Image (tube, rainbow, N blue to C red):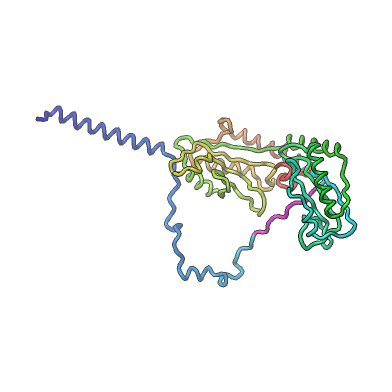
Amino acid sequence: MTTTLQLGLAVGGGLVLVAVVAYNTWTARKNAPKQPDPLPPSSVQTEPSADDLERRDPAFEGDDLPPLPVPERKPGMDALIDVLAAIAVEQPVSGDAALAGMPPTRRVGSKPFAIEGLNAISGQWETPAAGQRYTQFQAGVQLANRTGALNEIEFSEFVIKTQAFADAVNGLPEFPEMREEVARGRELDQFANDHDAQLGFTLRAVHAAWSPGYVQQHAARLGFVPSLIPGRMVLPSGTPGMPPILGLAFDTQAALAEDLDQSALREVTLSLDVPQVDRAEQPFVRMRDTAAALAEAMDGALTDDRGYPLQRDALDGIGASLEQLYDTLESRELAAGSALARRLFS
């Protein structure tokens, strides 16, 4: 026969077990990565009705169709950051012949290499195209980029490739002096090293971790869109063809996990490639505002890459330094976001 004591112990043990299970459940939920908000019913896609299809017919929209974005014209070569070799020809050369003589690769070592022709009709320098005629050509190789300055071996390869093209179009190339150009490349490379800036802010979870979907949802509300790289989003420029204003990145493995809801992120990184973005976009101000908005919405703390909190005074100091950097770049005709700056700092 079960005694009162045994019954009490059984009841008490059951209550303890329930409490333990409840506590474990609460702890698991508390520590689980934060999930994105569910989509409202209005955002759920459904099959379009006949009326919808009729309304979407271009014949009913007239001039309301948005214009297609115009791709940015590829910037031409410039003596400021390129070695240029003129190629004279006795008579106009067809674009087809020029294309047939082009080298298979557009690089010399780690530097971009290009050939341009002077269009006989437009009088503009351009990459040779079929159906056009050209009265002269020029070949160029970039003096420096983020891999370093042009060296003697790369210059020699530039000469070989240019000479091969000149032979193909019956042209006569004229090369600058190698030592002078290599020295110019080193000077430009030193300037670029001294005035390059790539900023990064880290946003760390204060309490619960975040799921990738949670991060993506909050970033999307601020204008970020997914990039081709898993775990990376970008804030696009308002100008078609221009580099993104900001980047946002988190762990690639978490982005590729089979169950994204269970992937736990403790930090995300905001980045700004200063020379690549036009000053007029106010990229640093937008970076600060974006970081603050994400920190508030996601319960995060803003730090540098070493984990130290970023205070307002420190951010103000960074902003002032960037203004000086912008002025210096502009004084060298390498304004941030310009075609030349984007090529040099790449």
At horizontal 64% and vertical 36% (from top left) the residue drawn is: 316
Left/right placement of residue 159 relative to residue 112 reads right
Residue at the left extreme, as displayed: 1
Camera-side residue of 238 and 182:
182
Pick the front one: 213 or 148: 148
- Location of the N terminus by quadrant is top left
Q: Main secondary structure of the magenta part?
A: loop
* Along the viewing direction, whichever of 270 and 318 lies nearer the viewer: 270
Relative image position of residue 161 (x, y in whole percent): 80, 46
Residue in view at x 57 percent, y 72 percent: 59
Q: Is residue 139 left or right of residue 55?
A: right
**As drawn, 60 above or below 213:** below
The single residue placed furthest to the top in the displayed view is 5
Picture coordinates of residue 218, whole percent (x, y): 51, 46
Residue 76 drawn in magenta:
yes
Q: Is residue 301 above or below residue 87?
A: above
Which residue is outermost to the bottom?
59
How many dots with numbers? Answer: 0
Figure quadrant of the C terminus? top right
Question: Where's residue 89, x and y in %?
Answer: 88, 55
Q: Would you identify the image quadrant in which residue 183 lies?
A: top right
Whether residue 169 is in magenta: the answer is no
Q: Identify the magenta region.
A: 69-77
14 is higher (above) or lower (below) than 298: above
Q: Is residue 334 above or below residue 47?
A: above
Image position of 127 (left or right of 315): right
**Residue located 54% across and 37% down the image:** 203
**Residue beneath the point at 22% across and 33% down:** 14
Q: Is residue 260 visible?
A: no
Taking 87 as reference, is 28 left or right? Answer: left
x and y percentages locating residue 120 in the rendered image: 84, 61
